[in-house]
Amino acid sequence: MQYLAVFEKEVNSYSAYVPDLPGCVAIGETMEEVRGLITEAIQFHIEGLREDGVVVPLPSSTAAFIDVATA
């Protein structure tokens, strides 16, 4: 399965969250680090849901870049 992860540049770090898995977040010093951490977080989150007997949400979020006039 592929879940959408949203990455954000912070002042001194990067963060990521997964809209389809509320509470699934990661923070790292580099983009590469946060990519690895969010992958681990997704796996851990899904394992926890299954252990608790909760249905794992299917991926449903999408993203798109929208062009807007800036003038």
Image: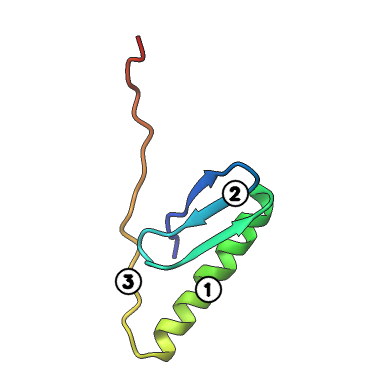
Q: Residue visible at 33% across and 68% down?
A: 58
* Disc 3 target residue: 57
Residue 19 image-quadrant placement: bottom left
Mark 2 falls on what kind of element? strand
Image coordinates of residue 69 in percent, x first then y, are 32, 15
Mark-to-mark CA distance, 3 and 1: 13 Å
Which mark's residue is nearer the viewer, 2 or 1? 2
| Residues packed near mark 1 inside 10 Å, few (<14), some (14 to 19) or many (20 plus) | few
Mark-to-mark CA distance, 2 and 3: 25 Å
Tag 2 near tag 3, CB within 8 Å? no
Q: Residue visible at 63% across and 48% down?
A: 13
Residue 66 image-quadrant placement: top left
* Disc 2 target residue: 14
How many labels, in total? 3
As drawn, 40 above or below 70: below
Image coordinates of residue 70 in percent, x first then y, are 36, 14
Image coordinates of residue 20 in percent, x first then y, are 35, 63
Mark 1 falls on what kind of element? helix
Which mark's residue is nearer the viewer, 2 or 3? 2
Among numbered discs 2 and 3, the one appearing first in the sequence? 2
Kind of residue at disc 3: Pro
Which numbered disc covers residue 66?
none
**In-image side of 35 versus 53 (left or right):** right
* Disc 1 target residue: 43
As drawn, 50 above or below 6: below
Q: Residue visible at 45% across and 77% down?
A: 46
Kind of residue at disc 1: Gln
| Residues packed near mark 3 inside 10 Å, few (<14), some (14 to 19) or many (20 plus) | few
